[in-house]
Image (cartoon, coloured by chain):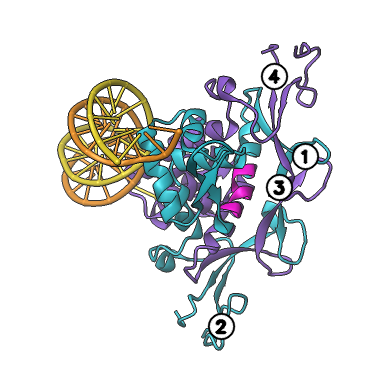
Chain colours: A purple, B cyan, C orange, D yellow
Amino acid sequence: MTQPAGPAGPDTDAVIALTGRFADRDAWQAEGWCRIEHALELIGTRSAMILMREIYYGGRRFDELARRTGLTEAVAAKRLKQLVADGLLQRRPYREPGKRTRDEYVLTELGRELFPVLVALMQWGERLGRKGGVELVHAGCGSRLGVVVKCAKGHEVALPDTAARLVADGNGR
Amino acid sequence: MTQPAGPAGPDTDAVIALTGRFADRDAWQAEGWCRIEHALELIGTRSAMILMREIYYGGRRFDELARRTGLTEAVAAKRLKQLVADGLLQRRPYREPGKRTRDEYVLTELGRELFPVLVALMQWGERLGRKGGVELVHAGCGSRLGVVVKCAKGHEVALPDTAARLVADGNGR
DNA sequence: CTGTATCCCAGCGGATACTG
DNA sequence: CAGTATCCGCTGGGATACAG
């Protein structure tokens, strides 16, 4: 049997099963225990992704974001509201000298942590043949950004060296 | 003016503009020159993402993929066909001893290169509070996978140390 | 076992007009 | 400048039935 969860913390979640590549996972697959799906519930739309992109590029004001993403104001407003509600962005009063106060959209910690996802997507998009476009570079040295897959202990990991593991939800399940 | 492209290769694309964070980019923004959008055209749907996830977990046969993703057969078939057409997957004849020949879906090079995107999404999804779920680990040492943003020269890069750059498409544009 | 064919509905995102 | 309100077409994805 699986051992009980015990005092489970973020890094001590009980391992229910360590799956080899073809172990049966149908049961928990049905439970919706997939972090990718959780992530996609928040940023699974095109508009959410490219709004976040524009924020990373430095956009802050509503009209700037709407125009640069090419989204209609209606869609931009709706999605920004959702991104704020979901905790990726925050509205903050803002004032340029000599102008009236306005609101700006700024990244929260959660929003900042999405950055690697966008970098990974850009890197993969680069692979798709079409030349030209925008790329993110290291401001310090000017060379392109990409992502590297590593494990928590710092080893660089290639696809064949991976395994999938099921962890408890902290309630012993 | 910007210098002409010259003998432009993948790594020598002419830099049209090195944008500071608030430089005006409305013109080229309209051109659809965004690699994230290119990427999302291929894997922008939930079904595409979770099918790829399932392939990374080791799934290969149609019914396995459909059942474990929870997608209907209709949706799974349609999306798999598209993923094959787009070059992320390949169908290959396959035979288990004593059974008849079947087809399996295997990753192409392009499909393998999507891996960091899924890892980044899983890592971010982990942040969303819900405990439990599947995680990918380094088979060698058992610790969790994540991604690190680096520039081509190997420097680890944080969000404030980035800049966006516009590059030519190889035809001088 | 590996799909295809229909039917259906909800949500995304465009267009346009209007408000504080 | 920063949104709301409506309308509307398209596609994603579920359900179900059928086919090679």
Q: Nearer the viewer, residue B73 or B94?
A: B94
Write down the residue under mark 2. Answer: B8
Figure disc tally = 4
* Drawn side of residue B8 relative to residue A75, left or right: right
In percent of width and height, residue A106 lies at: 56, 44
Mark number displayed over residue B139:
1
Kindly check if marks 1 and 4 are in contact, taking CB atoms under 8 A apart as contact: no
Write down the residue under mark 4. Answer: A168
On the same chain: label 4 and label 3?
Answer: yes
Q: Which residues are drawn in magenta?
A: B111-119
SS for tag 2?
A: loop
Mark with earlier residue (2, 1): 2
- Residue drawn at x 77%, y 39% as measured from the top left: B139
In percent of width and height, residue A155 lies at: 82, 48
In percent of width and height, residue B110 lies at: 55, 57
Q: CA distance from mark 2 to mark 4?
A: 52 Å
Assess whether residue A154 is covered by the magenta stretch.
no
| Above or below B127: residue B158 | below
Q: Nearer the viewer, mark 4 or mark 3?
A: 3
Circle 4 crowding by C-alpha within 10 Å: few under 14, some 14–19, many from 20: many
Q: CA distance from mark 3 to mark 2?
A: 35 Å
Q: Amino acid at mark 2?
A: Ala
Mark number displayed over residue A146:
none
- Quarter assignment of residue A127: bottom right
- Residue drawn at x 50%, y 60% as measured from the top left: B35
* Drawn side of residue A152 relative to residue D13, left or right: right
Disc 3 sits on a residue from what chain? A
Q: CA distance from mark 2 to mark 1?
A: 41 Å
SS for tag 1?
A: loop
Q: Nearer the viewer, mark 3 or mark 2?
A: 3
Can residue B46 be seen at all in this image of the molecule?
yes
Write down the residue under mark 3. Answer: A160
